[in-house]
Each structure stands twice: as structure tokens, then as C-alpha cells.
Amino acid sequence: MVHRYKLIEFQENAYLADLDYHRLLPVDGLVQDVFERIESDTEEIVSDLTDKYTESEIRNCLHYLQWPQVQSFSRALEVPPLKILAPRMHSTHGELRWNTLGASVAHTELLKALSKYATIHVTQEFEEMDNMVLTPFNIHEKSSVSRIIKENYDGVLFWYLDEFEMMSLLNYLHVPVVLPVYAARGDNGRIINGMLRWYASMRNFDAFMTLSQPTIDLYSTFLQDTSLFHIVPCGVDTDFFQPKDKGQAKQEVAELLDKPEITEKPIVGYISRFQVEKGAGVFMDVARLMPEVLFLAAGSIEENRPYDFPENFLHIGRRPREELPQPTRLGFRRYFMYPVPNRIGNQFWINSFSFAIAICYVSIRGG
């Protein structure tokens, strides 16, 4: 069955209106002639047009009309690829949890996948890849915003929930804006409050990209209409997350932190803000019950709160920027178990990463 098109002529130019993909495609005389005979037999079309075009051109045109993923059906004038703006104000390297828990990896892989179908315009330094363009941008400069408007982007994909400065773009860019949701709740209500702020500003053609149905179920308790939420399952890059010899991984971390005891004991890992609602107290209580195991925590800590750390507890704190992207050092691979003692909240992708690298993943029932 032929894809749904309508031939339109405007100011001496011809276009095919793609009724399924909602786009207008410029065409030349070949496509016009073939489309006018589209109800005929293939061989009959070839026979009718062989005086004007070669047989291969005619058959290729028929093929394109049946397979709409081709961007343009004109031999001379092609439609430019989609342009996606992926702006960010902050650096992902400043967020330890964002990196170690894989959110930056997931978002990077998402952009890589999109770059196969569109040109991605990023506003900060990004790893070099095909169809990736660096476009300097400052939301607070009118000239910078003006340049972004003139680019005529086909869509916007944000990085961060808490970059509320970007919300003003909804007033200027009349294209779909997508906000990824990698954590449904947490940070003392900051995530939920941020989501509701964005929801109040979004238009009916914008969207939240969520990883699973529970996120939508959660927000249905706050919102009557959850049609802006769309599930895009989070996969695992098995070339990036794969099992590694624990002894070698622990040796790397021991040298990095200058903590030789890391190589001598099994390690139970904790990656989050070290706070009560994140299960910090539970983590330390379990550590006291298992002195033969080293409990290692990465992430920020409330410095103004006194903690009675057990002897087998090691908090490595925030790490330098160059260390953060190394999954073999600050990721899961050094652990033999990764518990999530959160009393509230959870990250839905952690279990997939844990399984991919053969780590035991334990979560409390309410997490």
C-alpha cells in the first residue's frame, strides 16, 4: 500500500504533503509524473515514462513512495535533516550521582541514537560524533536567543529538570519540547516540585520522556491529565556496562583513592546523597553488623550533621571531574552488592545496569 500523500503545487513548485509524517516534501517532475500514475501497474508506469526518464529512476521513485523514511523524493532538491536543539546550562560532570548512576550515559546514548536521524545542536562541549554541532548559547542574552529562534529547530530535548531558566524558550520556540525524567522523585521533593512547574508551563504538543509506567502512575495522583508523559524504555549499553574482574576493579579504585583496604574486603556500595531519607542510617546500621565487609559510599554528605561512622565505613565524597566518567573506577563494577535503602524514591535504570555487570541489586520494598 502506498504511503498517504497529496500532491500540491505552489508558486510554480511542486510538493508532496506527507499525511502520515506531517511534513511537506519538495519534488521534481519525475515524482509528479509517477505520482499521477500511482494507481497503475508498475510495468505500465515504466512503459509510459521511459521516453522521459530511465527505468532505474522510475523504479527508485516508486520504491521511495512506498518507503517514507526517505527524506526527499526529488533528484535535485533534498529536504534538510531534522534539527534538534539539546541545550544545557550546567555541566554533567558536576553531578556525581548523574554520572555514577548512569543518567549522563543514558542521555548521551539517546543523543547518539537521535543523531542517526537528525542533526543535534548542543550548547556545551560534547563528545565528538557525526551529526553533532556545537552551538554556543546563553539563555540570558537576547542576541543568543534570537539566533536560536532563527535556526528553525524541529524540536528541543532538554538535559536537566532543574534548569528552569530554559522554561522561557517555550515562549519563543513553537516546536515540541521534550524533558527526560530519569528519576521520578527525590531530593526532598525538589524533583516533584520541578516536574509540576514544567507541567504548568508546557503546551499540549510538548512531552515528558519517562522510563517506566510507575512514574506516570505517581504523577497521576497530582495531575488529572497525564497525556504529556510518554514511556521510552531505558536500555543498557552492554559494551559499556559489562562484567569485569572484581579484583582488578577494586585495585584500580584502591590506587585512585590511596586506600589499600579496598582490595582486602568485599565491598557494598552506596551512591547517593548521604541523608536519612536516602537510607544513610540503614546503611551504617548494616555496616556495624558486618565488620568483615567494607561499606563504601560516594556522593555528597551533610557536613553540618555529626555522623558516628563505623570503622568499616569509607566515604569517598565528591571526586575530580576527570574521574567521574570512568565506570570502572567510580561505577558499580567494584561492588559485589549494591543496595538501595531509600525510604523514598528510586532510580529505575539502576537495576538494569546492575544486572548487566553481574552485581547483586537489593532494594527495600518501598523504594
Image (cartoon, grey):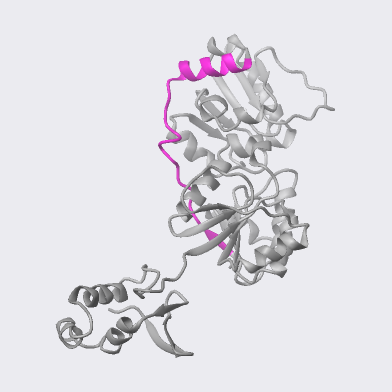
Residue 27 higher or lower than 287, as above or below: below
Q: Nearer the viewer, residue 29 or 236?
A: 29
Magenta residue check for 177:
no
Highlighted range, magenta: 229-257
Q: For the C terminus, which image quadrant?
A: top right
Q: Is residue 183 left or right of residue 141?
A: left
Say how many tags the image has.
0
Q: Residue at x 57, y 64 (%)?
A: 155
Q: Nearer the viewer, residue 215 or 243?
A: 243
Give the image location of residue 160, x and y in percent.
66, 50
For residue 308, what is the image quadrant?
Answer: top right
Residue 125 higher or lower than 249, as above or below: below
Q: Residue at x 57, y 27 (%)?
A: 330
Q: Is residue 331 left or right of residue 130?
A: right
Q: Is residue 357 left or right of residue 33?
A: right
Give the image location of residue 117, x and y in percent.
44, 59
Q: For the N terminus, which image quadrant?
A: bottom left
Q: Residue at x 39, y 86 (%)?
A: 6
Give the image location of residue 118, x and y in percent.
48, 60
Q: Residue at x 22, y 75 (%)?
A: 59
For residue 74, what is the image quadrant?
Answer: bottom left
For residue 60, what is the image quadrant?
Answer: bottom left
